Image (cartoon, rainbow, N blue to C red):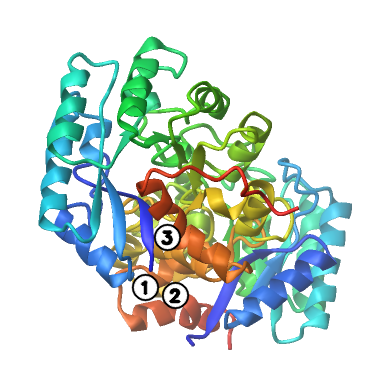
C-alpha cells in the first residue's frame, strides 16, 4: 500500500476527529494536517476568540494522535494583531506546521502583508483557500489570480493554492510560472485529466494530495490520483513525497 | 462484474477530454475493470442535430457489442426528432434514451417533453434525465446551464408511472430535497457520479450509506460520468463503502441489468427500516 499524507483536512468536533482518523488510517494514510474552521456557517470570518478556540482544539487532537495529526494555524487576517499573536502561539507552542487562511478577506488585501512577513521569517507554508466560481464567489474568497499576485509579492513564502483553484484550468495557468506556489488536489471536483494536466504544466513536485475531509469523501479524492494516467513515482510524490518534504520529515 | 451507467463518447468544445473517442473510452473502461458501459453521445449535448452523435455511438456499439450499451439522444424541441427517434429504436438498436432538457432548452412541463416520454413509454425505453454534466461552478462563461429541477422531474415520474426514469448527475442534497415527491414512485433510479461527500451528506457517514438508508439500494446505479470525471473516484466510493455485499452488487451491476431488462424497482423493495 502506498504511503499517503492528507494535507487538507478540517475537523470540527471529537466525532469528526475519531471518524476521520479511523477512516484515513484504515486507508493507509500516515499523517493528516488539520485545521478547524468552526463555525462553518458559510461565513468563514472567525473572531479572534473563535480562531483561538479552533487552534486549541486542533492542538488537543495533535496531542491525542501524536505523529498522525499535524496542525494548520487558522487565523483571520482582518484581526491583524490577534492573528499574529495566534500564529506565534500555534507555531511555537502548539508545534503547528503552517498557516491556514480561508475567506477572512481576499488574499490581495493589505491585511495579509504582516502575516506573510511572519510566514517568510518563520519559513512556514501558507495554505490558502482558492476557488474561482463562474456562478459567483463567496465574500472574501480568493481566486487563482489573487494567489498569483500574493505569490509574486512574497516569493520566499511557499503558498499552497487549495483545490487547484477550483476551476483547475484557470488555477494551473495562473500559478504555472510561480515556483513558490504548490497546489492541493482536495475537493469535490474530480474532472478526468485535471491531475495529468497539473503534472504536465506544474510538475508532480508541486502537487499535494488533500481531501477536504470530512466535507468531501476520502475515496472520491484518492480516486483522482489513483485513476490519473501518470507514473507510479509521480503518484508517490503527490500522495506522500512532496508533503513529507514540506513538513520537514 | 461492474457496469458503468454514466459514460459518453464524442467531442466536447470546452476542453479536450482525455479518453473521449471510442478507442480512448474503451481503453479507460478496460483499465478500470469495467465490464459494460451505457454510452451516450457527448456531441449531442450541444449540437443542433443529435443524430451525428447517435451515429457515432451506434458504430461504437457495433464495434464493441459485448461492452457498449448504446443510449440515444434526441431533442424533442427540435424539428424532426420523431423520425430520429424511430431510426434509433427501430433500426439502430439503441437501449435507452438520454435527454438534456436544460441544455436543449425545454422544461419538463412542456408538450415537447410529454411527447417524447409517451414515445418512450410505447416502446418501453428507459429515459435518462441529465441533471448536469459539469459542475455549474466550472462552466464556460458563455454557456452557463442550470441543473435540472428535480421537483419537475419528480412530477414527470409521477405523471408517467409506466416509464422507467433515471435521474443522472444529481447531488445528494438535490435528491434528498425532492424525496417527498419521489418516495411514492417505483419507476425511477439514480446514479452516484455527482455524489461526492459531506456537502451531499451531513455528518461523518459515507454518502452511499445515507442513500441506501433514504432510498434503498435497489434504486442506485454505479455511474462515473467518464470521460468528464475519473472512473476511479466513483468506483472507490462504492468498493470501500461500509455496505452489504448484496447492496454493493446491486449498485455495481444488478440494478443496471434489471433496468436493461425492462424492470422497475419492485414495490416490495424498500429503504432500510
Say which chain tag 1 marks: A
Alpha carbon of mark 1 to alpha carbon of mark 3: how far?
35 Å
For the residue labelled by badge 2, is the local secondary structure a helix, a strand or a loop? helix
Q: Write down the quadrant of residue A23 in the picture.
A: bottom right
For discs 1 and 3, the disc positioned in front in the rendered view:
3
Q: Tell whether label 1 touches label 2 (CB within 8 Å).
A: yes
Question: Which label lies toward us, 2 or 3?
Answer: 3
State the residue in front, B149 or B260.
B260
Q: Which residue is mark 3?
A: B253
Marked residue chain, label 3? B
Q: Residues within 10 Å of mark 3 (few under 14, many from 20)?
A: many
Let me know if residue B234 appears in the view: no
**Label 2 vs 1, first from the N-terminus:** 1
* Image x and y of residue A173, in percent: 34, 52
Disc 2 to disc 1, C-alpha distance: 6 Å
Residue at position x 74%, y 55% from top? B203
- Label 3 secondary element: helix
- Give how far across and how far down residue A39 sits, in percent: 80, 49
Percent position (x, y) of residue A178?
39, 61
Give me the disc on residue A238.
2
The residue under the point 58% across, 88% down is: A249
Amino acid at each position: 500500500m502506498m504511503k499517503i499524507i492528507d494535507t487538507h483536512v478540517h475537523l470540527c468536533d471529537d466525532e469528526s476527529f475519531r471518524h476521520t482518523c479511523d477512516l484515513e488510517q484504515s486507508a493507509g494514510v500516515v499523517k493528516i494536517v488539520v485545521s478547524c474552521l468552526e463555525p462553518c456557517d458559510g461565513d468563514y470570518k472567525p473572531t479572534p476568540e473563535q480562531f483561538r478556540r479552533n487552534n486549541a482544539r486542533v492542538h488537543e487532537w495533535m496531542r491525542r494522535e501524536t505523529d498522525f495529526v499535524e496542525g494548520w494555524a487558522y487565523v483571520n487576517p482582518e484581526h491583524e494583531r490577534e492573528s499574529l499573536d495566534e500564529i506565534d502561539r500555534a507555531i511555537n507552542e502548539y508545534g503547528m506546521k503552517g498557516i491556514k487562511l480561508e475567506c477572512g478577506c481576499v488574499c490581495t488585501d493589505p491585511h495579509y502583508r504582516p502575516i506573510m512577513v511572519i510566514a517568510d521569517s518563520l519559513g512556514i507554508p501558507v495554505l490558502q483557500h482558492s476557488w474561482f466560481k463562474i456562478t459567483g464567489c463567496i465574500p472574501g474568497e480568493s481566486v487563482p489570480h489573487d494567489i498569483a499576485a500574493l505569490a509574486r509579492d512574497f516569493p520566499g513564502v511557499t503558498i499552497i493554492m487549495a483545490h487547484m483553484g477550483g476551476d483547475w484550468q484557470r488555477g494551473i495557468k495562473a500559478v504555472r510560472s510561480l515556483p513558490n506556489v504548490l497546489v492541493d488536489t482536495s475537493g469535490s471536483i474530480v474532472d478526468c485529466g485535471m491531475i495529468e494536466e497539473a503534472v504536465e504544466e506544474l510538475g508532480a513536485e508541486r502537487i499535494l494530495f488533500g481531501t477536504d475531509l470530512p466535507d468531501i469523501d476520502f475515496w472520491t479524492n484518492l480516486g483522482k490520483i489513483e485513476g490519473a494516467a501518470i507514473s507510479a513515482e509521480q503518484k508517490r510524490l503527490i500522495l506522500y513525497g512532496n508533503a513529507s518534504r514540506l513538513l520537514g520529515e | 462484474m461492474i457496469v458503468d451507467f454514466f459514460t459518453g463518447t464524442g467531442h466536447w468544445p470546452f476542453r479536450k477530454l482525455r479518453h473521449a473517442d471510442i478507442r480512448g473510452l474503451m481503453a479507460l473502461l478496460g483499465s478500470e475493470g469495467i465490464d459494460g458501459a451505457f454510452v451516450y453521445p457527448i456531441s449531442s449535448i450541444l449540437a443542433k442535430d443529435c443524430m451525428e452523435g447517435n451515429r457515432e455511438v451506434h458504430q461504437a456499439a457495433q464495434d464493441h457489442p459485448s461492452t457498449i450499451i448504446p443510449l440515444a439522444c434526441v431533442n424533442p424541441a427540435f424539428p424532426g426528432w420523431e423520425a430520429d427517434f424511430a431510426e434509433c429504436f427501430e433500426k439502430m438498436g439503441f437501449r435507452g434514451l438520454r435527454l438534456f432538457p436544460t441544455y436543449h432548452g425545454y422544461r419538463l412541463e412542456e408538450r415537447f417533453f410529454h411527447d417524447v416520454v409517451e414515445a418512450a413509454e410505447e416502446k418501453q425505453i428507459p429515459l435518462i434525465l441529465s441533471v448536469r454534466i459539469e459542475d455549474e461552478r466550472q462552466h464556460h462563461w458563455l454557456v452557463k446551464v442550470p441543473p435540472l429541477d428535480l421537483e419537475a422531474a419528480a412530477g414527470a415520474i409521477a405523471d408517467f408511472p409506466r416509464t422507467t426514469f433515471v435521474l443522472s448527475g444529481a447531488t445528494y442534497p438535490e435528491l434528498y430535497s425532492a424525496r417527498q415527491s419521489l418516495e411514492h414512485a417505483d419507476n425511477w433510479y439514480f446514479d452516484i457520479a455527482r455524489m461526492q461527500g459531506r456537502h451531499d451528506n451531513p455528518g461523518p457517514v459515507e454518502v452511499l450509506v445515507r442513500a441506501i438508508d433514504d432510498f434503498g439500494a435497489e434504486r442506485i446505479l454505479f455511474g462515473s460520468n467518464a470521460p468528464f470525471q475519473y472512473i476511479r473516484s466513483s468506483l472507490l466510493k462504492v468498493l470501500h463503502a461500509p455496505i452489504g455485499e448484496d447492496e454493493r452488487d446491486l449498485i455495481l451491476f444488478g440494478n443496471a441489468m434489471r433496468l436493461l431488462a425492462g424492470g422497475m424497482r419492485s414495490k416490495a423493495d424498500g429503504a432500510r427500516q
